[in-house]
Image: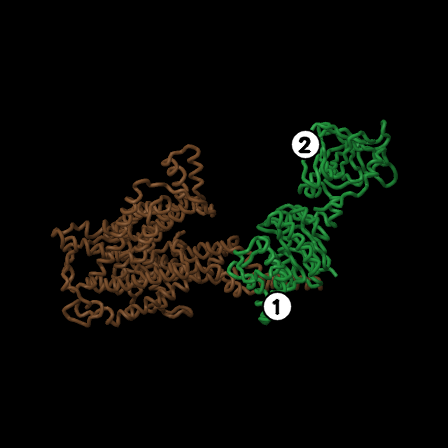
Amino acid sequence: MNAIELQGIRVALDGKQVLQDIDLTIKQGDFMTFLGPSGCGKTTLLRTIAGLQHADAGTITISGREVANGEKRFHMEPSARRLSLVFQSYALWPHMTVFENVAFGLQVRKLAKADIRRSVEAALDKMRIAELVARYPSELSGGQQQRVAIARAIVTEPDILLLDEPLSNLDAKLRVEMRAELKRLHQELNTTVIYVTHDQHEAMTLSTQVAVFFGGRVVQLDKPRELYKHPKTLQVAEFIGNGGMQMNQLEGVIRAGGGVWGSHRLETPIAVMPLAEGDGVNEGLEEGQEVVLTIRPEDIKLYETNQAGSLGVSVSAVFPSGAETLVQLDAGGWQLMARVIGETEYEPGDTLFAVLREQQMNVYDKKTGFLMELSYATTNNQLGESSHEDRLSYSR
Amino acid sequence: MAARVERELAQRTRFHNQARNWLANPVHLIGIAALLFLAYTIVWPVLKIMYTTFIWRQQDVRLTGEANPGHFTLYHWDRVLASDMSMNLFYKPILNSLGVGFAVSALSMLIGCGLAWLVVRTNIPWKKTISFLVVIPYLLPSWIISQAWLTFFKNGKIGGTPGILEALVHVSPPDWLSYGFVPIVVSLSIHDSVFFFLIVGAALSSMNSQLEEAANVSGAKRMTILRRIVFPLVIPSILSGFILIFTKAISSYGVPALLGTPVNFYMISTMLYSSMRSRLTTEANVLSLTLMIISILTIYLNQKVIGRRRSFVTVTGKDSARTLTSLGRWRYLAASATTIGMIIISVVPLLVLLIQSFMLKEGNYSLSNLTMHYWWGGSNPDINTGEKGVLQNPIFMLALKNSLKIAGIASIIAAVIGLILGYVVARGRQTWLGRAVDQVSFLPYLIPGISLAAIYISMFAKPTFIIPALYGTVTLLILITVVKELPFTVKAGSASMMQIGKELEEVAQISGASWFTRFRRILLPLNRKSLVSAFLLVFIGAMKEMELIIMLITPRTETLTTITFYYAEKGYEQLTNVILMIIIAIVITVYFLAVKFGKADLTQGIGGQ
């Protein structure tokens, strides 16, 4: 069953269109992440689902029940939607103890005192903070406050748990810890989770589905792995590549067949790649079409000796970071970043040979920014094939 | 056909839902209620008073044959502004008012800013003592200081016992020292400089001293830093203090009535009162309007001058370690001088008044002259034409009851209304409703208390709609106190509400808490400090209120201040002093209770605009 269905949601804030025609379906038990840069409308959509923001158009259906209809100006009370929201700021009530904070929602529902106590204790246990029950929020660390906020959200056993950038106020170590905690919680509770973040790693590691937002629209809805491998637009690729992943970009041109190459080819400043010919592949290419080519650092393999199809590069800087090393390369004036597992002995100025794994490259039309389906002619670059040792299941 | 019906039906649901959504928002419901209340208690009266000044009255027929009751005329304005009585009725009083207003603001600024700088920015010792001494005059009615002034500097002009000065040196003080401009300005300045102290002090202490240090590092000298950095940063608060005190001073009544009237020194406020008493109601209304126009002009000028820079002071909430200016070897000298000066201003007058309340005959400083007669003596036809001692006097008991009732109820209502309207202002900042409530609740600030009272007399003299004739009831006094204090309580309420994130309320909303539950369980406790401060502010204001209620008082609604003022005018000095002491005792007790148990802070809300 679908937990949430959004159809044609439109929201304007202060006369500015923040969300435009959002269609989205979220399945029961999904961990759905809304990912995007700040100001892209992801938090607004979360608030619209919660009922704190009214949609100007479109409908929201939760568990088969229509809770909002923009055309009819119908907006069900947030409390009737059976969901909970954890705010970025936690929004703990400073004048109440942890117990009172967590118990509030149950007290409002006029449950029996004993039941309230039992439920609150269970929720605190689940968040592993049972011992903090009598403290005030000001006496808690950031991570503990976060746990209280989540305990307060789950104590009412909502069908849907909404989380608005819950980790952004934590330091790096706690963030990793809480990420694991959230994943465990999702598996234990088996509720549907909608998670808003601008952090690519969080989105990749936690979600079962990711919706990428730009300018008030969903530009890509995919599983994390797909999103990482094949961003649909250049914008998404850049955004995904930003978070410390050092995505390489090259500009290139499509050249028509003829000459030595005999077929269409993709020319970049550092390499020329012949494209496959045949029915149904590489259609609609134009001579002189400008493209942008992206390749992730881990898809550049480095060799100390010349390989077939490799290009000569010189090392311009080395950034060791423990488990892996980033090597900055200079290829005829173009800067490339390669990721190597483990430590390397490269020194700046060394000459190396780099092989770009064509299959892992993504090529985008420079004008539209959309991903192009290209297939390459089987080349002399067998190394590209043989290096499919699948050494990277990327995770952090 | 069916399609059309369906479309119409959809339209209807749409409107129905839209209306329901709008009303479901507490900001809208409360906002509308608030606007109606404010419209009836503030906007309507002002419009009505304006209207009356342009219309012939029935009584005018006796004055001139041209009168045509119920029709438009400029007669009243002409009479106030351009007739043979204008000089005395309007021009002299207005010049006096403006003169007093400017002089008081300037003098208070000097005293208040100087003290604020000393306490906040230098390493002067005894800071707590000095701050406390500065606040004392604020806890007293301003005309107590006039009363004390008279005790010292009274001359034989209006008879009675001469003051201490004459008793000591046997020289009668000149009129200018005993009555009129000088003593009025001094009394008001002593009372009002505390506003400057609090406002500018708050601005100075929220100013990051890194700003000064940065200038220092760039090579600026101390004077240059004061002139180019500190002064421009606190100028918005200085100006808003100036406006606050100016508008307070021009509309003050008690002080000019005690010190000005004996030498025919009239200000608009005292002239307004005596025109009212001599049934020149419409002329009094014209005077009210001119007072309002002056206040509005001042505030407009203030906006013009400050413009956007208003928000300077509150920018840095972060409290960094302040580096204090060292006074060097002047440290203790400065502290002693300030403390002694403040004691002379705040404590000595009180002590003198206290001692006087035990003196059978004024001016006789022998031990045998001491008596408790004025506190609880019976009726003696030889003393004060038989007025009983205060604690024996049923009128006093009535006044005490009324005062406590008015101050207690009005301050609770005003504080709660302030918080609720503050909620509407803070949460509805982007909507027309929130802005309207914000603007309209500020209006009473522009209406001098005495004018507001003049309006309320005619407004509540007879029943209208469902509202009974309130004139002569304590309810009216409570109502006018609440309305007059709204600008301060709403300001304090909205400032405090803005500190509270919207999410805190939204979480509760998602949990299913109704607005009332949210207010009671979340907003109220979180705003407790501001609520108690607003309560204290209104309570102190109401206990010493004079301008606002003097015209509305009837024998049944006598309060401590009006009875004191009546005694003072009659020349029953000891009785006056006894009641003053009781007022002060009440105010100080409540002040301490509120500060100790409610963590009240007077600076909140006093910030004026």
- Which of the marked residues, 2 or 1, is nearer the chain's N terminus? 1
The amino acid type found where label 2 is placed reads Ala
Q: Residue at label 1?
A: A118
Question: Residue B558: x and y, percent?
Answer: 29, 67
Q: Position of residue B476 (x, y in %)?
A: 36, 66
Q: Quadrant of residue B490?
A: bottom left
Eyeballing the image, is B109 above or below B3?
A: above
From the viewer's perspective, is A97 left or right of A318? left
Q: Looking at the rendering, which quadrant does residue A128 occupy?
A: bottom right
Chain B on-screen colour: brown
Which lettered chain is shown in green?
Answer: A
Where is mark 2, residue-wise?
A317
Callout 2 crowding tier (Cα within 10 Å): few <14, some 14–19, many ≥20: some
Residue sticking out furthest to the left: B170
Q: Do the residues bearing badges 2 and 1 touch, measured as CB atoms within 8 Å?
A: no
Dot 1: within a 10 Å radius of its alpha carbon, few (fewer than 14), some, or many (20 or more) residues?
few
Quadrant of res A252: top right
- Where's residue B560, x and y in %? 28, 65
Q: Return the residue nearer the eye: B345 or B51.
A: B345
Residue type (three-letter) at the residue carrying disc 1: Arg
Q: Is residue A328 above or below residue A21?
A: above
Give the residue furthest to the right: A278
- The front one of B107 and B609 is B107
**Element class at badge 2:** strand
Can residue B484 be seen by looking at this rendering? no
CA separation in Å, label 2 and label 1: 59 Å
User: Is the N terminus of chain A in the top left, top right, bottom left or bottom right quadrant?
Assistant: bottom right
In which chain is the residue bearing label 2? A
Check disc 1 and report its element: helix, strand or loop: helix
Residue A116 lies, in percent from the top left, at 59, 68
Mark 1, chain letter?
A
Residue B585, can we see it?
A: yes
